[in-house]
Amino acid sequence: MTSLTVVPAPLSALAPVSSRHFIFVYELKTQEEARSYCRQHYTDLATVENMEDVLTLNEMVDRSRLQLLKPPDGFLNGTWIGLYDDVNTWSWSLSDPTYYSEGQENYRNWAPGRPNNIRANQFCVWMYQSGQWEDYECTYRLQAICVNLTGSSETFVLTTASFTWEEAQQYCRQHHTDLASVKNATQNSQIAALIPTNSAWIGLNRQRWRWLDGNNSTFSFWKTLQPDNYETLEHCVVADFESGGRWADSNCDKMRPFICYGWAVKKYKIKLQLNTTIANLNDPVVMEQLLQQIALRVGRANATDLLKLSWVKDANGNVFNKTTTP
Ligand SMILES: [Ca+2]
């Protein structure tokens, strides 16, 4: 294969092998059903990354088809996209896994009906004097429980000043070890005994809205007064094309049309002219090696797992034909 030259010029034409595109599905499904449909037929429910995506969706949508859909709850307030809120993604500020024995990281002592994420804005946790926990807005100001770790001993300390949860985290990390984690019922009682009145922040908080496909985009396009987690039942998101594609949180069990995304497949035919001393280029082994070489070259500019290469055969079953140049 050393005498083989793969002409690189036409390969650059392969650069945009695929691009992301949206698919509106004008059928009514719950968010979970819509998600499986998208994963089966395309990639996932749509991730909306920026204003360009919003504009694309507004241009694509057929609003008259949307208006023909009659959901069982009688009111079509939007179209599923891939954003959701999981109230079970709690994690401790003190994240060192060696600090916890098995199961201790998952110790919880929620007050009845909590976490309830009222107004879709409760991502931080305080402990009541009773020892029960409440999820609440992180910007609320409260005293906090810090922990001092020295060797194997843990000491809990109540701050004298009041802080937002983030300020409390900063303060505890600066003056102690961190905001307090609660690893078991014994520690929960120890900490509760320090709380003079009302409540105090502990180290638990959680992630905000997330995209199903794991995309880290922080772009958001909410309608006014949304999200609100109405009746604390709204953990999925619709885009409302009567409001320019702005978002609202919605009950995941509602029947809604939806938007998937996938990767457009582009096909290119390339002619190769090879200067070579190899006798039989139509030998399957040689052709396979050639494909690998081409894949390597193209792979520099493309994700190779998105790339499929194959030979085009002529009527005689040959890929290569010999030509002689003077
Ligand atoms: Ca709450």
Image (tube, rainbow, N blue to C red):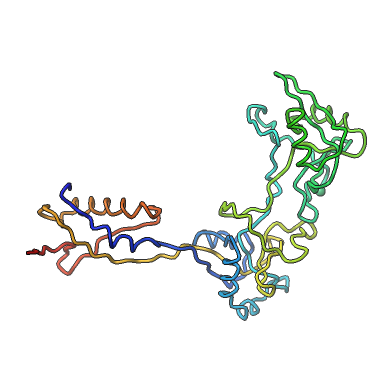
**Which is more toward the observer, 115 or 290?**
290
Q: Position of residue 134 (x, y in %)?
A: 82, 43
Q: Position of residue 77 (x, y in %)?
A: 70, 70
Residue 181 can be seen in this image: no
**For the point 56% across and 70% down, which residue is it?**
56
Q: Position of residue 66 (x, y in %)?
A: 63, 76
**For the point 70% across and 56% down, which residue is it?**
235
Q: Quadrant of the C terminus?
A: bottom left
- Residue furthest left in the image: 326
Left or right of 68: which side holds 261?
left
Left or right of 264: which side holds 140?
right
- Residue furthest right in the image: 197
Determine which quarter of the picture holds residue 247.
bottom right
**Which is more toward the observer, 265 or 86?**
265
Residue 238 can be seen in this image: yes
**For the point 39% across and 55% down, which residue is it?**
302
